[in-house]
Image: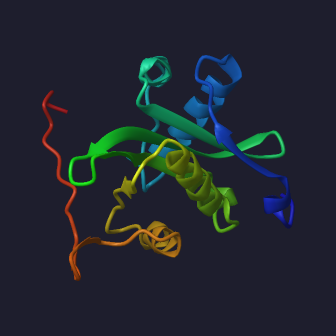
Amino acid sequence: MPADPASRLLVRRADLHNPQDAAAYRDQLNHYAADPMGSGRPLPQEILRQVTADLAQLPHAHAFLAFVGRQPVGFATCFGGYSTFRARPLWNIHDIAVLAQWRGRGIGAALIRHIADQARAAGCCKLTLEVREDNPSAAALYRREGFRAAAIGAREVQYLFLEKALDGD
């Protein structure tokens, strides 16, 4: 591994219609899923294929890949939303991960900065994301990159991310 990966780091939008990008995205997603901060287990191949096929067709989905040289080392998935209070689009960073052996080298920060630049160019008013309570490293990265609790006037309000399964999983 190079001493200074930032000198060879490239973050770009993934073209999920391109077989190489789709394969790199699936590989990164599967590493994330298998990580303890994901679900702790890899995803079935049929799910991985379906995800890239579906995301390639969704106009509000935005996939990104990070490379050091030609090696994919991280990824992010964002979905467009809309702020009714600001009457402008927003993006939610749904997935973001860096391969374990590449963490702590600025790759996650580079992904976030690239996403922020792309979201600004798309006219978005903000980025949102969720972070697990038991992932202090990611939470610290997000704070360093400017993510904060929402502000209602001068008061900070921390939102909880809740889910309700609809299919029995």
- Residue ID at (67%, 65%): 106
Look at 17% across and 46% down and name the residue there: 163
Q: In this view, does 134 lie to the left or right of 8?
A: left
The quadrant of the rendering that contains the N terminus is bottom right
Residue 34 visible to an observer of this rendering: no
- Residue 102 vs residue 64, the one in the foreground: 64
Q: How many marks overall?
A: 0
| Residue 3 seen anywhere in this rendered image of the structure | yes
**Whole-percent x, y for residue 149 in the image:** 30, 72
Residue 54 falls in which quadrant of the image? top left
Q: Residue at x 66, y 58 (%)?
A: 107
Left or right of 162 in this view: 118? right
Q: Is residue 55 above or below residue 115?
A: above
For this orientation, the residue located farthest to the front is 87
Query: Residue 90, position in %: x, y?
Result: 37, 47
**Image height of 21 relative to 125, above or below:** above
- Looking at the rendered image, the quarter that the C terminus falls into is top left
Q: In this view, does 158 lie above or below 155?
A: above
What color scheme is it? rainbow
Q: Position of residue 136 (x, y in %)?
A: 43, 73
Query: Residue drawn at (66%, 17%), measured in percent from left and top?
Result: 19
Image vertical order of residue 153 relative to residue 125, above or below: below
Quarter of the image holding residue 121?
top right
Q: Quadrant of residue 67?
A: top right
Residue 155: x and y in percent read 20, 81
